Image: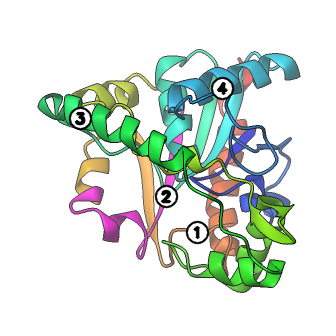
Amino acid sequence: MLALHGWLDNSASFFALAPQLNNLHIVAVDLAGHGRSEHRPGQMAYTPWDDINDLLAIADQLGWERFAFLGHSRGAIISTLTAGAFPERVLCLGLVEGLLPEPGLPEDAPVQLAKAIGGLRSQLQKSPSIYPDINVAIKARERGMFPLGYEAARALTERGVVAQGGGFSWSTDPRLLAPSILRLSREQLSAFVNNISAPVKLLLATEGLPKLYTNYLQQVAKFPHINYELLEGGHHLHMEQQVVVVAQKLNEFFAEFIASDVWKK
C-alpha cells in the first residue's frame, strides 16, 4: 500500500494512523518537493500528473503490479486520479479528506495559466522564512490553514525542515505555493471517478472540506460507488485524537476487501 500525504505535508502525516492499521505493508512517500524528497528541476510546476508517474515508478521498483492507496487531502486526490487512469493497477483506496481537485471552467483556462506562471516566477524570487529554533517552526505549523495539535505539528515539522542560516526553514519547494497550471472541468474529473473499478472508502471531517467548500457532500454523493462517511473532527483528523475512529473505519474496510473475491484474483 502506498500512503500519500497532503499538500505541504510529508510522510509523517501517517505517524499516528499507520501503526493502528492491521496486516498491511505500508510505504509512506514524501511526494516530490515535500519532506525529504528532492525538488523538481529548473522552473517546473508541480502537477498531479507528474506525481502519478512517480508513484507508478515507485510501485514498479517495489515489484507491485497491483497495489492499494491510503491518501490524505492532495494525496487522496492523486490516488483517485491514478485509480481512474490506471484502474487495472489499483486494488482499493482508503481516502481521508480528499477525492478530486477543485474544478475549473474552460473559459477560465487562459487566466489560470497566467496566474500559475506568474505565481511560479514570484515564488522563485522569494527568500525562505528562517525560524530561530524548531519550536518556533512547530508553533507556525500549528497555526496553518488547517490548525493542528502540537504532536501532529511536531511530526510534520521535524520531517519538513532543514537547517539554514543559523535556524530552520521549510524543506518544501516554494513552487508548490503557486496556483495550478490547469484545472480540469467537473465533467473531466467525474470521468476519472467513474472509471475507478476498485472499492473506495472516503472519510470526511465535519470541520474539513465539507465546511470549506459549498455543496461538497452533495458532489461526493453523485458517485454511488464511493463509500463515504462524515466524522467529527478537522482536516487532519487522522493525526489527531480522532485517529482511533479513522483506524477503525479503515481497518473494517480493508478487512472486508481482503476477504473479498477481488483480493484473491
Tell me the crowding category of disc 3: few under 14, some 14 to 19, or many 20 or more residues within 10 angstroms, Cα based.
Answer: some
Disc 1 to disc 2, C-alpha distance: 8 Å
In the rendered image, which residue does mark 4 sit on? Answer: 261
Q: Secondary structure at mark 3?
A: helix
Cα–Cα span, label 3 and label 4? 33 Å
- The answer to which of marks 1 and 2 sits earlier in the sequence is 2
Q: Which quadrant holds the C terminus?
A: top right
Question: What amino acid is found at the position of numbered circle 4 in the picture?
Answer: Asp
In the image shown, does 185 or 199 lie closer to the viewer?
185
Tag 1 residue: 236
Disc nearest the viewer among 1 and 4: 1
Q: At x 54% / y 26%, what residue is drawn? A: 82
Q: Secondary structure at mark 4?
A: helix
Q: Amino acid at mark 2?
A: Glu
Residue behind mark 2:
97
Q: Which mark is residue 186?
A: 3
Residue 13, horizontal then vertical, whole percent = 71, 60
